[in-house]
Amino acid sequence: MSVRTPLARVEGLGAAHSGTAHFWRQRVSAAALVPLAIWFVCIALSLIGDDRDAALAILARPQDAIPLALFVVAGLYHMVLGVQVVIEDYVHREGPKILLLVLTQFFAWIVGAVSLFALVRIALAP
Amino acid sequence: MAEQAKSAARPRPLSPHLQIYRWPVTMAGSIVHRATGIALAAGTIVLAWWLMAIASGPAAFDTFSDAARNPLGQLILFGFAWSLAYHLLNGLRHLAWDAGWGFDIRTANRSGILVFVFSLLIAIAVFAYAYAARGVRL
């Protein structure tokens, strides 16, 4: 016999109220990041030692710019999910916890905006 | 009643603390996975700076290049490369576990050690390539 209410059983979200959504998003972004991170390292290695003009020419190509943009977005998304778990594990007071979770979100949006702005600017550079 | 008072006065057994606990491989791997994740989160600032430096102009590009060539910069970049290699390889280990593979103690210990070894080798190989093939000079 279950002590859970019929509504709780139907929703299937458990004690965390969000079910397996967080777990699943973390795994899907992880899987996406495997090829994207490898591609990022290859691009970065191919640019080492080059001057700015060579770097501009390479990063303006769609086969480099698009995976790099995806790497930034998927990486920051994965980062927010991961850092959230660390904060929830170690910070137990409600106020500081919520503040840190919000700051993590702000951090991701700012770093993402700067990175994507830079990529667009490189792609449109004359 | 007297019996109860005596047992309350006796110190209760304590579980071992981290300092005197022999670290199992899987525990070390789990802690390092978190630590490298945090390091990579901080590393996104370097990534944004790098892209912005290329986008902004020659002066910003030179500032970034000088910082990257600096010994401290090289140390940070090596840490970033190793963190990425470790987090990626250990992440694959986690995905395999989630799929139900390799979760027995023997395999988990062995894959844990392999991840440490291969992540270091990858980071060293990346730097060796940067120095040897791309002609990086400090």
Image: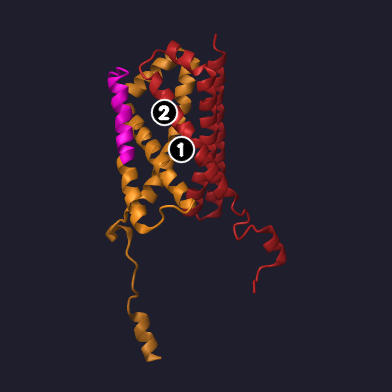
Chain colours: A red, B orange
Quarter placement of the C terminus of chain B: top left
Residue B111, position in %: x, y?
Answer: 35, 48
Classify residue A113 by image quadrant: top right
The residue that label 2 is drawn on is A41
- Residue at the extreme front of the image, as rendered: B101
Q: Residue at x 34, y 69 (%)?
A: B14
Instruction: Report whether A53 appears left or right of B10.
Output: right
Residues at discs 2 and 1 in contact (Cβ within 8 Å) = no
Callout 2: residue from which chain? Answer: A
* Residue A42 % position (x, y): 41, 25
Give the camera-side residue of B117 and B137: B117
Task: Determine whether the residue tagged by mark 1 lies in a helix, strand or loop.
Answer: helix
Residue B40 is at least partly visible in this image: yes
Residue annotated with mark 1: B41
The kind of residue tagged 1 is: Ala
> Marks 2 and 1, how far apart in space?
16 Å
Q: For the residues tagged 2 and 1, is the chain the same?
A: no
| Range drawn in magenta | B118-138
Tell whether A37 sits left or right of A103.
left
Pick the residue in front: B50 or B11.
B50
Q: Position of residue B58 (x, y in %)?
A: 44, 12
Element carrying mark 2: helix
- Magenta includes B95? no
Front disc: 2 or 1: 2
